[in-house]
Image: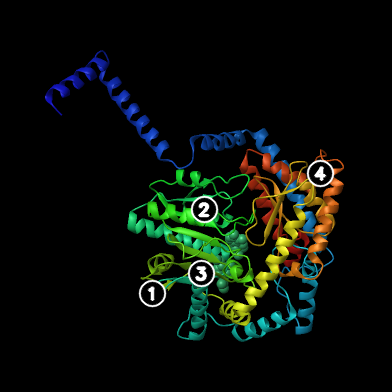
Amino acid sequence: MSSNAFNAITRQINCLFGNKEPWQVASITAISLMTVIWLLEQIDHDESISSRAKNKFFKLMRLLPQVQRKIDTEVSKVSAGMEKSVQDRTAHMEYYSTLPLLGLSNEELLEEVDKYLSLGEYKWKEGRVSGAVYNFNEQLCELMSIVYQKTAYTNPLHADIFPGINKMEAEVVRMCATMFNGDENTVGTMTTGGTESLIMACKAYRDYAREVKGIYKANIVMPRTAHAGFDKAAQYFNIHINYADIDPITTKVNMKQMAAKINKNTIMLIGSAPNFPYGTMDDIQAIAALGLKYKIPVHVDACLGGFLIPFMKRAGYPLPPFDFRVKGVTSISADPHKYGFTPKGCSIILYSDKKYRHHQYTMTTDWPGGVYGSPTVNGSRAGGSIAACWATMLHFGIDGYVEATKRVIDTTRYIERHLRQIKGIFIFGTPATSVIALGSREFDIFRLTDAMCSFGWNLNTLQFPSGIHICVTMLHTMDGMADKFIKDIKAAVGEIMKNPGKPVEGKMALYGQAQTLSDRSLVADITRCFIDSMYYTPGAAIKNGK
Ligand SMILES: *Cc1c(COP(=O)(O)O)cnc(C)c1O
Ligand SMILES: *[C@H]1O[C@H](CO)[C@@H](O)[C@H](O)[C@H]1NC(C)=O
């Protein structure tokens, strides 16, 4: 800086503070500096100022005793209602709150299991439920129980004791890498479910970005329709999520938004193939191109579609490329326990390169129990699940999966064609695989949920935008099932359309209201109560236990 300019600045400052006392000069300086730092922090913050102001406002409101009291009474009313419905379902049964003094005999035990399994009111074996159970037949169950019987007590943590289980896991990973057109660098691990696969990918990329790029305030850019498991991972790992909006018509992610939300702290981009709510597939090629452009890893969540899309071309339903053939895709999650038809507890996470998988591992080198390294969340893992997954995949083979895919997609397209002809409802976007989501511009769609429920159907409810979906499984491919579904929807919509303006009532009204609550922490409170109700224990049982 030239001395002239320096003099000019000092003159300005002296002029500004000319008639101020020294203490005033000091405090003005301190306050200005703090303000500048605060402003910089606000700009650096990932969450928008308006969104934080809103949350702060609701928090402050809750400090008022009247407000908090009102909320508490409302929440406990809802909570009591939830507990009551669990209670009603189970009241006729004994409740174990303490270990039985004498162990039960095998017959007694198996009788008990049957009693517990008969509790639900939905006929899922008849295909009355969306998703949840993807295949069910006696023959497969029998095979699984034999495989599980032989391996139930194995544990891949002890590689020296159960090398066969390790070989099975390695083979499952490799077979999946081949399915998704990976190359010799493609690696992965098995996990215990789709959510754990997503959590592992987030952990791997967070630690990769830390080490390679020095990013400590990580964020993820993903479509609003991406699975809630990513939010879970973000909550666990202190990662921020920048959501990209979806196109309201196609329900695919808006690519302009996706690009705009990327910043220097972005550690991963996400696309779904397809997404869970609307069953549509994001433009994976465009997301991968963004990843290449900004050198950010791209995860494709194929948890739902992972065991359908690799077989769709052979089944006669080609889709745009979504897997490792697309340059820029660095990881894929897929769930054998959905359309791979394995028993619950199996998922896969694959990476295009070893360096990512290395950041998924955790290592503890100085533990007195020994040097401890493990690939996923668990220490001990269920060898039985790995063996069951391995056996199911070998049992089906390519032909078996192509055949199953053909049946599921044939049925989905059949249902879709017929639903499109029903007046009063519409279908969101173009269903990519097996999920069809319905909405309505004429009536409150939650009325259709209610009506279908009274016909014995359990469908999924969607919000932002409101809708309901059916996820077609092997159970729906049984003779006449699709027609039953179409017939019931037709009847229900016909009835509703007689008075389309009528508001929704009952449980679904609460669900609809929850969507319009701007204090989302209230919705969280109610959700907490719901989870509590899953662990409901009658007061009397607790007393008896003592
Ligand atoms: C089911 C699903 C998941 C999570 O799977 P879980 O096995 O339930 O943990 C993730 N993503 C999509 C798209 C899914 O459909
Ligand atoms: C391992 O961890 C997952 C959570 O990621 C859990 O669901 C599973 O039951 C755990 N246990 C075993 C033995 O795999």
Rendered location of residue 335, percent (x, y): 58, 68
Residue beneath the point at 61% across and 55% down: 280
Rendered location of residue 474, percent (x, y): 71, 70
Sort mark 3 into few (<14), some (14-19) or many (20+) by Cα contacts within 10 Å: many
Which badge, 2 or 4, is on the more N-terminal residue?
A: 2
Real-space CA distance between mark 3 and mark 2, rounded to the nearest whole angstrom: 29 Å
Kindly check if marks 2 and 1 are in contact, taking CB atoms under 8 A apart as contact. no
Task: Reply above or below: 468 against 312.
Answer: above
Of marks 4 and 3, the one in the foreground: 3
Colouring scheme, one of rainbow, by chain, secondary structure, one colour: rainbow
Which residue in the structure is indicated by mark 1?
371
* Ligand 2 falls in quadrant: bottom right
Q: Tell me the number on the disc at residue 180.
A: 3
Real-space CA distance between mark 2 and mark 4, rounded to the nearest whole angstrom: 34 Å
Q: Nearer the viewer, residue 187 or 478?
A: 478
Q: Looking at the image, can residue 130 be seen? A: no
- Dividing the picture into quadrants, the one containing residue 110 is bottom right
Which badge, 3 or 2, is on the more N-terminal residue?
A: 3
